[in-house]
Amino acid sequence: MPSQPRKARYIDPFHPDEIRRLVREFGSPLLIVDCARVRAQFRKLRKALPGVDLHYALKPMPHPAVVETVVDEGGFLDLATTGEVQLVARLGISPERCIHTHPIKRDEDIRNAVHFGVRTFVADNPDEIRKFERYARDVRLLIRVSFRSPGAVCDLSRKFGCDPEDVLALARLAAELGIDVRGLSFHVGSQAIDSAKHVEAINACAKLIAAARRERLGTFDTLDIGGGFPIEYMQPVPDIGRFCAPIRAALAQLPKRVRVIAEPGRYIVGPAAIGVASVMGRAKREGHWWYYLDDGLYGSYSGQLYDHARYPVVPLRNGSERLPSVLAGPTCDSIDVIAENLMLPKLEAGDLIVGQAMGAYTWASASEFNFFPRATVVSVNSKPGDLGTVTPFPL
Ligand SMILES: *Cc1c(COP(=O)(O)O)cnc(C)c1O
């Protein structure tokens, strides 16, 4: 009897034994990306937003294994730079799965993306629309609208997006230049606390789309509801199904012909990775144990500055006695402190510290300040039996 190929057992790379094994094999600091968790996140969001095409925004974690996992799940991509276009092109992914959503581009960025085969772009002002005149036959636009969101941790509607009152004038300009406007997009801000802003923006866009269609200003058959879907760091957040329920209700009011897409970044990849750092040395200062790690605010923990995130940190060592402790990064800068006033067991050089929910806006914004190298990224479970693959990056 021919032997059945053994089905690869799922090994959880976030289990302490696996973390230790991966660090032995790939070194420290390490960012462990679990593609099984990327899949799970993607599926949860797809279930919470049925009928919405999910374009993964590469920016929070532009890693090939994440991109390929999303595409493998039937997902789409949201590109914003020539570098991201090149990454996707090298992976052999069809440009039909991609949109380009940076509202401000150089001509060469547009040219590179058009040359790759991207057709849908975003603009939010007259100058940017005029840049597309020479590509009018090849492209269609989404007009990005701004809905201010002072409540969001990162309000993305301050830097980009036009006032809702300006949408029709921009659509008229595009029509005069022979450029088709396919619809509207917005981004209410990352890590939204609730979905009220999404709902308000969807309702406002529905009215604008109807007005533009009455004036026959373009196809206007697409609404892009952006990203912003929250994940749990130190504070609990609503379950994604509950978060999206009001969004589903608002989308149900749209005319059937309007295709809805979204651009999730953080939600797809944030919970799918952990950061692992090692204690390089320690010192007792004013009654507190200071532990100096080989990753910090200039590295994977850069999100604590740029993204205003706080990652739950746990040592892999157990111990009943807990002492007041500080976790610091490796550089010689005094700002490079990850967490203070922690109660931790007494740690030793070589002990491992795990930062949770570190997939989004962490490694992507890390630097090599002081010549401390960025964490190695190892992807696991990208296919059955994948126990850890380091992809040279950039590819
Ligand atoms: C960063 C970004 C996203 C991803 O946002 P998340 O809050 O991480 O989901 C989506 N779209 C655009 C245009 C972005 O700039």
Image (spheres, helix red, strand yellow):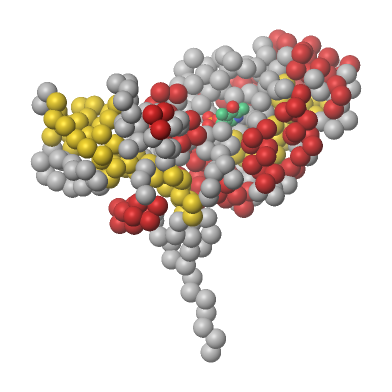
| Residue beneath the point at 73% across and 14% down | 125
Up/down of 245 relative to 349, above or below: above
Left or right, 321 with respect to 88, comes to left
Which residue is outermost to the front?
371
Q: Position of residue 159 (x, y in %)?
A: 59, 15
Q: Position of residue 207 (x, y in %)?
A: 71, 19
Camera sees residue 221 = no
- Residue 156 picture quarter: top right
Up/down of 289 relative to 213, above or below: below
In the foreground, 379 or 244: 379
In the foreground, 20 or 252: 20
Left or right, 352 with respect to 80, comes to left
Q: Quadrant of ligand 1?
A: top right
| Residue beneath the point at 58% across and 37% down | 58
Q: Position of residue 347 (x, y in %)?
A: 18, 41
Left or right, 30 with respect to 65, comes to left
| Residue beneath the point at 32% across and 38% down | 294
Camera sees residue 3 = yes
Up/down of 49 relative to 35, above or below: above
Tally of numbered discs: 0
